[in-house]
Image: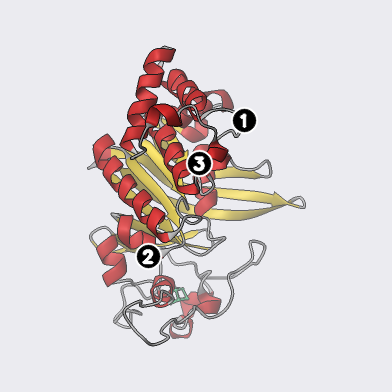
Amino acid sequence: MENDKVLDVKNLTAAFSIRKKEYEVLHDISFSVRRNETLCVVGESGCGKSVTTLCIMQLLPKNGHITGGEIILDGTDLTKLSKKDIVKFRGKKMGMIFQEPMTALNPLLTIGFQMKEMIKLHRGVDNKEAERIAVEYLKKVGIANPESRLKQYTFELSGGLRQRVMIAMMLSARPDLLIADEPTTALDVTIQRQVLNLLNDLKKDMNAGILFITHDLGVVSEIADRIVVLYAGRKVEEGTTEQIFNDPRHPYTIGLMKAVPDVDSDEYNIEPIPGTFPNITEEIPGCRFSPRCPYAGSCKLCTTEAPEGVEVEEGHFVACHLALRKESPNE
Ligand code: SF4
C-alpha cells in the first residue's frame, strides 16, 4: 500500500501574514492519496481545503507560506523545490481542475493550440503527434467531433464542454495526481453527474490518484474512496467513505451530516451546525470546534488542550477528546 502512494502530505503547516502578524491557516495536516483512489477533502468555506491545494501546487498568495511539514509527490518533497523546478511538476506530475475552467483556459487561443502546447511541453512530441493525442483525450472525455472542437475558442463552448476540455487538457499530460477544487459547483446537476462519472472512469483508466476538494457531501458520497474532514485548518477526522458516512465520530462531522437534507423525506430535516465559523485571527484555546460543540461541556480538556488524532478503528482517525470514551458523540 505504501508504494501505491502518489501524494504524501506530512504534518503540513502554513501561515498567512496579515498586517505584519502571522496567522496559522493549516496546522499539522497529514494525509495521502493512492493510485486509483479519490480522496475527498471536505469542510465549510475557510476550513483550509483550498489552502491545502495551493500549498501542494505551490501557488499560495504572496502573504502565504508553508511553515512546516513535507509534501511528497512521487518521492520528491515539493516544499524543497525552487520555483523553476516546481513548474516542471505542474502539468506533468500533477494537473489541476478548477471550478471555473476559464482559470486554466485562454479565451484568445483555440482549444487545439492550448492542448497541443500542453502536450508538447510535457510529453516532448511534435505538433502532429500532439494533435493526435489531443483528439484522443477529447474522445476520452466524451466530446463528439473532437477534430472540429480543436478549431474552436472557449466562448463557443457550453460550461460543461469547457470543463471537459480542461479535464482532457490536464489528463493529456498524464499526471500521476489530479487535483480537482470544487470542479462541479458551477455546473447543473446533469452535467455535474457526467463530470463525476467521467472522473471515476478516468481514475481507473489512467491509474492516477485524485484529490477532490468540495463542501458538497452529496458529491462526496458519489466519488470518494476516502475522506478527510477539515475544520479551521485542522484535520478532525479521516476514514473510508463508509466509515465517515455510516459511523462519523467527530461532532463536527456529525454536524455536517445532519446539515445535509434528506431528499427522500417530506419533512424539513436540516439541522445546521450552531454558531459561526471562526475567523482566521480568532484565538480559541483548546479544541477549535469547542465554541460550537454540543459536547464541549462534558470534558474539561475541550477548552484547554487541542485534541490529537487517534485511530478509533483501522484507517479511521478522529481528533476529539471524547473519541475513545464511552460517551463518544456517536454512541
Ligand atoms: Fe467537542 Fe471536545 Fe471533541 Fe472538541 S474535543 S469536538 S469540543 S467534544
Could you tell me which residue is drawn at 31 percent across and 78 percent down?
A: 325
Residue 108 — which label? 1
- The reply to whether residue 256 is in sight is yes
Whole-percent x, y for residue 322 in the image: 37, 76
Q: Is mark 3 within 8 Å of ligand 1?
A: no
Could you tell me which residue is drawn at 44 percent across and 46 percent down?
A: 180
Q: CA distance from mark 1 to mark 2?
A: 36 Å
Mark whose residue sits in front, 1 or 3: 3
Task: Give the position of the N terminus as an image quadrant.
Answer: top left
Q: Residues within 10 Å of mark 3 (few under 14, many from 20)?
A: few
Residue 218 — which label? 2
- Residue toward you, 261 or 144: 144
Q: CA distance from mark 1 to mark 3?
A: 13 Å
Quarter of the image holding residue 326?
bottom left
**First reached walking from the N terminus: tag 2 or tag 3:** 3
Q: Is residue 174 above or below residue 262?
A: above
Q: Residues within 10 Å of mark 1 (few under 14, many from 20)?
A: few
From this viewpoint, which residue is outermost toward the bottom? 267
Q: Amino acid at mark 2?
A: Gly
Q: CA distance from mark 2 to mark 3?
A: 27 Å
The residue indicated by pointer 3 is 157
Mark whose residue sits in front, 2 or 3: 3
Q: Amino acid at mark 3?
A: Leu
Q: Is residue 83 above or below residue 200?
A: above
Could you tell me which residue is drawn at 53 percent across and 60 percent down?
A: 47
Q: Secondary structure at mark 1?
A: loop
Whole-percent x, y for residue 12 in the image: 48, 47
Give the quadrant of ligand 1: bottom left
**First reached walking from the N terminus: tag 1 or tag 3:** 1
Q: Is residue 84 above or below residue 143?
A: above
Q: How many marks?
A: 3
- Residue toward you, 191 or 320: 191
